[in-house]
Image (cartoon, rainbow, N blue to C red):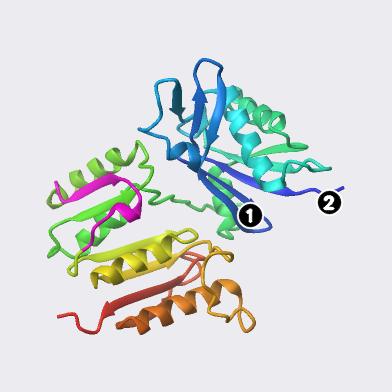
């Protein structure tokens, strides 16, 4: 049966849900659900529900069924998982998938059972739980089976970490703008910690909850996209080119359907073809480019593309 069923890994986050199959991210959507209040009927899930925030009538509640990585509303979480599993496996499947769900370190047994039961009720054949630090360590290739100590640090995720670090490295920049469609509630705590350690950062980082298409850039800006998924990297490059601004991108997962491979996929992997085409297109648009490879033990998504207009002062 394993030959015909799917094995799916699910990162069930407070802000976003990521689903992985065969080592590739196959789904990345906000963990948001829109519910018809009177009938308690789900009308939208994921990105579609996210787009309804601030626009839905009073009869529809847009909510996040998870808090701090654990289930706050069991029934809504179950139906959200069912939607995502159905989206990956299709509505007509003979064999139910096996699912592994990551949970935060330190969750209680009651919270763990809630996640496990929700995954089973959502349509999985078997459901397993794995603690997030262990999942991160396995993904990073750390020797988890040996009696040695390793530290896993989860950085970023809409918290503005990169913006703070860049301002620390370049004090000549007056400020930084952090843009994310879904800012995590804990971003304020991280910002306060940075300001406490480096008071010169006070008031210099601004957070805006919106899409990148709503951002206006100028020629003096530096546009940075770190581990942008799918077409987000292309959106960052387009924003920079439109303003003749400097740009640095470190892509994450690639969208093989919508991203341009430059007809190079016959010579190289689709991921590399997409990145090479991005670099060539940036060059054609009047940019000087630099390409760097970050050591794989720092990040497996390690192709860094940097660009600056030839006509920049």
Q: Residue 4, labelled with which disc?
A: 2
| Residue 231 screen position, x and y as percent | 46, 61
Number of numbered labels in the structure image? 2
Please tell me whether mark 1 sits on a helix, a strand or a loop: loop
Q: Residue furthest top?
A: 38
| Depth order, front residue of 199/250 | 250
Residue pictured at 42% horizontal, 35% vertical:
52
**Mark 2 crowdedness (10 Å alpha carbons): few <14, some 14-19, many ≥20:** few
Give percent across and percent down for residue 273.
54, 77
Quarter-wise, where is residue 164 in the image?
A: bottom left
- Marks 2 and 1, how far apart at CA: 34 Å
282 with respect to 165 (left or right): right
Write the residue at 62% across / 58% down.
24
Can residue 14 be seen here? The reply is no
Range drawn in magenta = 203-217
Label 2's element? loop
Q: Earlier in the sequence, mark 2 or mark 1?
A: 2
> What label sits on residue 146 in the rendered view?
1
Tell whether position 206 is magenta: yes
Q: Residue 28 placed where, x, y %?
A: 53, 49
């Amino acid at each position: 049966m394993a030959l015909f069923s799917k094995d799916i890994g699910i990162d069930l986050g407070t802000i976003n849900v990521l689903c992985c199959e065969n080592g590739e991210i196959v789904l990345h959507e906000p963990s948001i659900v829109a519910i018809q209040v009177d009938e308690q009927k789900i009308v939208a899930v994921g990105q579609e529900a996210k787009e309804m925030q601030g626009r839905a009538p009073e009869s529809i509640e847009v909510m996040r069924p998870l808090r701090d990585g654990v289930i706050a509303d069991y029934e809504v979480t179950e139906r959200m998982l069912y939607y995502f599993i159905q989206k990956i496996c299709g509505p007509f499947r003979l064999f139910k998938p096996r699912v592994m769900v990551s949970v935060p370190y330190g969750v209680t047994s009651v919270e763990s059972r809630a996640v496990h039961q929700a995954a089973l009720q959502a349509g999985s054949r078997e459901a397993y739980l794995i603690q997030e630090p262990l999942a991160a360590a396995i993904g990073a290739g750390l020797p988890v089976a040996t009696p040695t100590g390793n530290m896993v640090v989860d950085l970023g995720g809409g918290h503005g970490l990169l913006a703070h670090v860049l301002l620390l490295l370049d004090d000549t920049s007056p400020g930084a703008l952090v843009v994310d469609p879904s800012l995590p509630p804990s971003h304020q705590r991280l910002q306060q910690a940075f300001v406490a350690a480096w008071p010169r950062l006070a008031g210099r980082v601004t957070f805006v909850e919106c899409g990148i298409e709503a951002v206006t850039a100028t020629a003096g800006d530096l546009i940075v996209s770190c581990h942008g998924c799918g077409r987000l990297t292309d959106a960052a490059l387009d924003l920079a080119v439109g303003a003749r601004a400097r740009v640095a991108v470190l892509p994450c997962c690639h969208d093989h359907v919508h991203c341009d491979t430059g007809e190079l996929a016959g010579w190289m992997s689709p991921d590399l073809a997409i990145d090479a085409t991005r670099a060539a297109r940036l060059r054609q648009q009047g940019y000087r480019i630099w390409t760097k490879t970050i050591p794989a033990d720092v990040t497996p998504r390690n192709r860094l593309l940097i660009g600056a207009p030839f006509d920049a002062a």
